[in-house]
């Protein structure tokens, strides 16, 4: 017991002196403060130390927010905190508003999410990802006409991304317009013919139009392609979600397709 105590005694002052060294070094090299803070963040991922070294850099706060939302430890509370810090320092920081809108959407705070996305579009009306989020938020909030508008505007600016077609087809399905659902999914499949989500919504449209054989073909393709997917593949289709749910999400996607196939035999 006694022999271990001095080790603990010396470790604590060493840590304190290390932090003190960083702070003193930053003070003595103010012209390089931003670079030093970024260097410390990149090599330690210690947000507290990095932001003490430079507390007025919105770019640093945004980078930290991105780490906690997308690229490192999934912690949306901490990500939200740093996105808000970014905006406090630079109110027109477009990407921070966009990411904050995504976090509010994940939390189910659709009104707050929509306000952030509207801010993004006011700052840059051609920021195409914001139109997709505008559609998604309104779709989940039940504002179907506004959702359709958002997805159509997204497709105008990115006509190769399958997600725009898939979610626009989803909105038309919710509106009960199965012809538009089918046609929109078909347009998407011209870009991504093996996509399981598009094939599933395509089959669902045919099912509701009474065209069972066409529905079966689409559902079978959807199931075959979903069976090839890994949880990471599924997660790439749902950015911003907790990686811990990827396995469950993929299995639920497969179960939905199997359920739709079973409906054809009833």
Image (cartoon, rainbow, N blue to C red):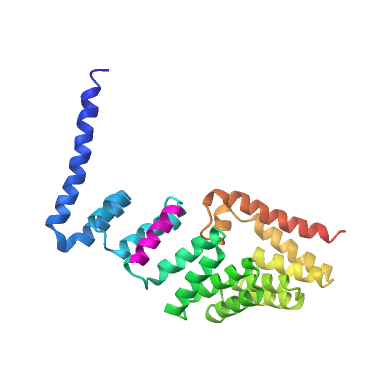
Q: Position of residue 12 (x, y in %)?
A: 23, 34
Magenta segment: does it hold 82? yes
Q: In percent of the image, x 66 and y 58: which residue is there?
A: 226
Residue 71 in sight here: no
Reply above or below: 28 against 190: above
Q: Quadrant of residue 203?
A: bottom right
Q: Quadrant of residue 30?
A: bottom left
Residue farthest to the right? Answer: 266
Q: Residue furthest top?
A: 1
Q: Nearer the viewer, residue 115 or 176?
A: 115
Residue found 32% across the figure and 52% down from its top: 47
| Number of dots carrying numbers | 0
Examine the image and state in which quarter residue 15 appears: top left
Q: Residue at x 71, y 63 (%)?
A: 221
Q: Is residue 171 left or right of residue 35?
A: right
| Type of secondary structure dominating the magenta stretch | helix
Give the side of residue 9 with respect to residue 176, left or right.
Answer: left
Q: Position of residue 25 (x, y in %)?
A: 15, 52
In the rendered image, the vertical position of residue 254 relative to residue 144, given as above or below:
above
Q: Does the stretch in magenta take in 175?
A: no
Q: Where does the N terminus fall, quadrant-wise?
A: top left
Front in this rendered view, residue 247 or 224: 247
Residue sitting at 52 percent across and 80 percent down?
Answer: 157
Give the quadrant of the C terminus. Answer: bottom right
Q: Residue 150 placed where, x, y %?
A: 58, 76
Magenta segment boundaries in residue numbering: 77-88
Which residue, as the protein is rendered here, is positioned at the far left?
Answer: 28
Q: Position of residue 60 (x, y in %)?
A: 31, 61
Observer able to see residue 107? yes
């Amino acid at each position: 017991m006694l022999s271990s105590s001095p080790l603990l005694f010396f470790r604590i002052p060493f840590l304190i002196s290390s932090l003190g060294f960083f702070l003193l070094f930053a003070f003595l090299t103010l012209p390089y403060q931003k670079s030093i803070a970024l260097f410390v963040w990149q090599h330690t991922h210690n947000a507290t130390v990095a932001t003490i070294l430079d507390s007025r850099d919105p770019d640093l706060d945004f980078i930290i927010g991105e780490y906690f939302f997308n690229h490192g430890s999934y912690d949306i509370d901490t990500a939200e905190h740093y996105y808000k810090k970014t905006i406090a320092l630079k109110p027109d920081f477009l990407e921070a508003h966009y990411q904050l809108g995504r976090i509010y959407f994940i939390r189910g705070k659709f009104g707050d999410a929509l306000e952030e996305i509207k801010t993004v579009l006011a700052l840059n009306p051609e920021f195409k990802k914001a139109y997709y989020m505008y559609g998604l938020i309104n779709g989940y909030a039940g504002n179907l006409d506004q959702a359709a508008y958002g997805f159509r505007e997204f497709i105008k600016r990115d006509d190769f991304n399958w997600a725009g077609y898939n979610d626009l087809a989803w909105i038309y399905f919710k509106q009960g317009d199965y012809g538009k659902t089918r046609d929109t999914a078909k347009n998407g499949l011209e870009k991504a013919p093996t996509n399981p989500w598009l094939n599933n919504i395509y089959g669902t449209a045919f099912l509701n139009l009474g065209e069972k054989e066409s529905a079966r073909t689409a559902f079978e393709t959807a199931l075959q392609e979903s069976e090839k997917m890994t949880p990471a593949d599924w997660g790439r289709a749902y950015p911003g979600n907790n990686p811990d749910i990827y396995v469950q999400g993929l299995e639920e996607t497969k179960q939905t397709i199997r359920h739709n196939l079973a409906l054809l035999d009833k």
